[in-house]
Amino acid sequence: MKRLLKTTIWVIALIFSYEINASMVCPPDKHLKCDDDISDLYLTGKPTLFGSHSYLTPVYEDQFFTNACNVGHVVRKWYLDLNHNYQADPSEPTCYQNIYLSENNYGSIIVKFPKDIVVNCLEDIPYMKPEITSRPCDLIGVSYRDEVFELLGSSEEGCKKILRKFTVINWCDYTPNSPYGGSVWYGTQVIKVIDKEKPEFTACKDVTIGFNEGCKARVTLSNNAIDPGNCSSEKMSWIVEVDLWGDTKIDYVYSNIGTGVFFLPLHKTGQEIKITLPELLGYGKHKVNWKVKDACGNLTGCSTNFTTMDNKPPTPYCVQNVSVAINGKDGTKLRVPASMFSLGALDNCTATPYIKYSFSPNPADSLRFYDCTNAGFQYLTVYAIDLMGNKDFCAVHMTVYDNGSCSNTLTAAGKVMQPSGKKVMAGSMTMQGNAGNFNVYGQISDGAYNFKDVAIYNDMKFIPSKTGLEDAQVDVLDYAYFKAYLAGDDTLSNYGLLAADINDDKKVNARDFLLLKDKLLKEKNSFGREDWRFIPSYVKEKDLSLLAYSPVYDAKKFNGFLDFTAFAKGDLSETRNEEARPRSSMTPIFVVGKSVVVDGKTYFPVSLGKSLNLEAALLKLSQNETQILQVNENFDWAGVGENQCNLLLKETHHFALDEVLFLLEATALGNTTITGELLDAASGQVYRLDQKLGFANNLAQLAPNPVSDRLSINAPVGSSYVIRSVEGKVMLRGEVIQNETVDVTQIVSGLYFVELVIGSKAEVHKLIIAR
């Protein structure tokens, strides 16, 4: 007993010693409900503090091991935040408390599903949630799906019924795929959709149906309807009743309960409905009753009439060209019936012998009379008319010859146009007849010719002619096309071959090319012979032959139109079936260099101020050839008159920056202008040139040159200037007000060009910026 007492005292002393040394003792573990507030320390308790820490406030942090329904275990860690860093450090007093949360099963879950409703339209359907009474910690989920049924019954029952099927689940108790089920509620809401809006027809119109072959009509009838409003039915049913001959007796009925050819499937709203009658119909007037019903049972109808008749015109076949002769001396008139032009006509109902012919829609206009007052070229329309009055026509041409028996009777006129539509402004047209013994000479003017009051013979011919190239545009583009053709890099159309045969030897070769080159270089206005080709309107380009070309044309072959297509020799671009190449003006590009002395005379080199790759070029200098020296070897050149010299590029050539084109005598520099055209090899662009050459002391002066910071431009007031790099980039631009001073400090050192435009004149100066 004494030994036991000693042991007990020792244990008590040990425990007492532990509690005295400890700073904090946690509250006991707690068992609470899931809906209890564990932040309420009156429920959970708080630690007891000892010793020197008893005045401190303990803090805690929770670690949750609970589910979505707040059921489970919470470990609460209490600690004294001695260093105020808002976390429990190993050196700080700490203890743990367990809080156990269990379900609160007091009461039961009650689910009340929405009641059935009736609505007017799908857009009016409200979403009505189930009414749910649940326990505090329950986690309730709601879902639904709609099953839509279209009803083809009466409108009173609605056009649609929707079964809205709800599913309610308590996720706190529900276990998927569990054989015991539970915690799931199902309910269905019935939604009836009522629609009173009737379908509307969109194509309820009377029609006329023409006969087919055999003088009968194959009848196909069509209609269309829509279901307006927001409750539009996806498909509608149709009933079509056909009353032949309009005798109130229904002969055919088509519907969705019909069989065979009389079955009509449901049609989508707005979809065209068609029916074809099983028999061919002759002439008559008939009636159709159309009825259409939507899915809600709303019915609407309309009635239309259809007429079966022959409304197909005959197909006439005519003689296109007719020639007749009159004797103007006996005073009689030539009687010409419209049937004279007929080769027959086909009609589906009227036999050929019963088809009538006239010169107008009036069947009585079947005869025309001709004498000296209306002889010549006649353009007529011949109508074929069947027994029902249907008609169609042929355009015909008749030539009434008087063979010289009438005095001044004929009128003949036509157009003369280039392939691009440009007019031929001048030329001649000869009418020849009576074996060459009768000739009338006329003029082509402003794209047309016109003969008035002349006699006409049975062998009459038209002979067009034109000398001179003033109406054509023969230039470097044609030169380039011809070179490409001779090199095998391009082809020519039949028109093009005729234009390229400049020497009329029925061949296209280098001889023709040399004539074109000579024309451009020496600026000739004619090749020294017939300069134009004329093609009559009755000849197609594909039928042309270079070997057979002869510009004498028989008047009988013209198809009623006495027109001609014309183009100049050498004008290959006019004969090409393509859009015209763009032509634009080029800014000043020629630069005058420092003077050189050759044989005691001062010359200035003229070069390009930019790098150019040229396919063709023609430069026209307003100076005598004696004032030009050392022309670049890539050019042919020749003098034209006393005050012009032309340079023509031989082949495609890439001109480098500052490549000298020629030397120009100093005395000519101030009044030399370069015009002409350049064909850029890369873009195909044609550039027009017009630049007056000058040098630094001509109209403007730049000082100093070279320059480092400020450039003085001494030029007439109002002049404009542009400073460009050798690549053509604009560095500065402006206008000369008065002795303009330009700050060039922002431009890096190098070679530049200053373009000056002074009124209608332009000049280019070299500028060196050096620092």
Image: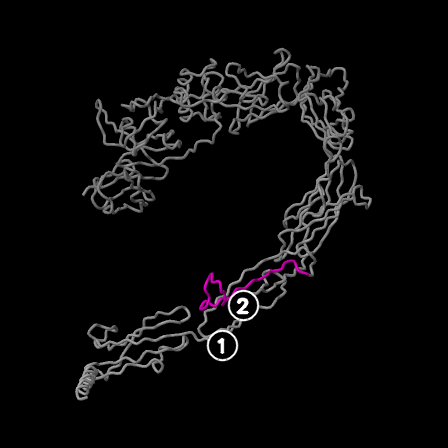
**Disc 2 marks which amino acid?**
Lys
- Helix, strand or loop at mark 2: loop
Residue identifier under label 2 = 129
Q: Name the image quarter holding the N terminus.
A: bottom left
> Can you give x and y, in whole percent of width and height, for residue 28 in the image?
31, 80
Q: Amino acid at mark 1?
A: Gly
Verify whether residue 184 appears in magenta: yes
Span colored in magenta: 157-186
- Contact flag, marks 2 and 1 (Cβ < 8 Å): no
Counting residues from the start of the chain, the first of labels 2 and 1 encountered is 1
Seen from this angle, which residue lies furthest bottom?
2
* Front residue of this view, candidates 479 and 304: 304
As displayed, is residue 106 above or below residue 487?
below
Res 474 quadrant in image: top left
Q: Is residue 346 positioned above or below 195 on the image?
A: above
What percent of the width, then of the height, locates residue 748? 23, 43
Q: Nearer the viewer, mark 2 or mark 1?
A: 1
Give residue 107's mark: 1
> Between residues 607 and 716, which one lies in front from this camera angle?
607
Would residue 645 be found to the left or right of residue 82 on screen? right
Instruction: Give residue 212's quadrant in the image.
Output: top right
Residue 251 in the figure: left or right of residue 149: right
> Within 10 Å of the Cα at label 1, are there few (<14), some (14-19), or many (20+) other Cα atoms?
few
The answer to whether 348 is drawn above or below residue 403 in the figure is below
Front residue of 26/585: it is 26
Estimate the x, y position of residue 9 in percent, counting from the top left. 19, 86
Nearest the eye: 107 or 377: 107
Q: Looking at the picture, how far across and down is residue 583, in whole percent?
A: 42, 33
Can you say whether 340 is above or below 758 in the image? above
Q: CA distance from mark 2 to mark 1?
A: 22 Å
Q: Is residue 240 magenta?
A: no
